[in-house]
Image (tube, helix red, strand yellow):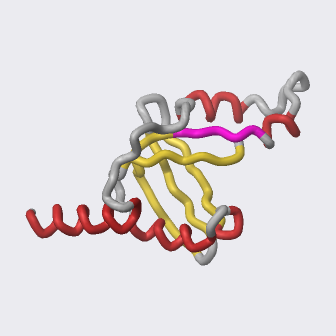
């Protein structure tokens, strides 16, 4: 068990210098994000405006899969589970894509990106 704890500590150190964030961005629940995405067919919704909105969600990683230059991560919070897609070319720093290998099922993460 102590070996597993050491592995996790090393991954944490490698990922963000061993420090926990002092604050996080204001996040919406996965449930709210999913509900708002499901109303895209309504005429009263400005779809172009919605797709340019930056959102933040927090949750626990339930499933993770990388395929080439793209990763699919299922995140769950108290309200719902949703999938985020991480594209290497969409990251501000493409080298951060390799840091995804440090994530494990069960890790709690914050994701920020374009809506839907």
Image quadrant containing the C terminus = top right
Q: Which residue appears farthest toward the right when viewing the image?
A: 43
Q: Which residue appears farthest toward the bottom when viewing the image?
A: 68
- Left or right relative to 100: residue 107: left
Residue at 41% x, 30% y is 78
Q: Camera-side residue: 56 or 22?
A: 22
Residue at 79% x, 35% y is 50
Give how far across and how far down residue 14 sits, in percent.
Answer: 36, 68
- Could you tell me what secondary structure mostly forms the magenta stretch? strand
- From what the image shows, is residue 98 above or below residue 31? below
Q: Which residue appears farthest toward the top when viewing the image?
A: 44
Q: Which residue appears farthest toward the left when viewing the image?
A: 2
Q: Quadrant of residue 1?
A: bottom left
Q: Camera-side residue: 29 or 112?
A: 112
Q: Camera-side residue: 114 or 31?
A: 114
Residue at 63% x, 74% y is 69
Residue bounds of the magenta highlight? 53-57
Residue 54 belongs to the span the image colors magenta: yes
Give how far across and how far down residue 21 sits, in percent.
Answer: 40, 45
Give how far across and how far down residue 66 sits, in percent.
Answer: 53, 70
- Left or right relative to 5: residue 50: right
Q: Quadrant of residue 101?
A: bottom left
- From what the image shows, is residue 26 above or below residue 14? above
Give how far across and how far down residue 105 sits, in percent.
Answer: 35, 57
- Left or right relative to 33: residue 2: left
Residue 17 belongs to the span the image colors magenta: no
Residue at 62% x, 33% y is 33
Q: How many marks?
A: 0
- From what the image shows, is residue 115 above or below residue 66? above
């Amino acid at each position: 068990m102590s070996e597993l704890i050491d592995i996790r500590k090393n991954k944490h150190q490698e990922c963000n210098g061993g420090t926990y964030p002092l604050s996080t961005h204001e996040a919406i629940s996965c449930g709210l994000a999913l509900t708002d995405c499901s109303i895209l067919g309504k005429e009263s919704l400005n779809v172009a405006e919605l797709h340019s909105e930056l959102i933040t969600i927090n949750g626990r990683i339930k499933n993770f899969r990388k395929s080439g230059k793209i990763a699919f991560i299922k995140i769950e919070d108290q309200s719902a589970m949703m999938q985020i897609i991480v594209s290497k070319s969409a990251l501000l720093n493409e080298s951060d894509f390799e840091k995804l290998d440090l994530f494990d099922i069960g890790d709690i993460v914050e994701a920020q990106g374009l809506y839907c």
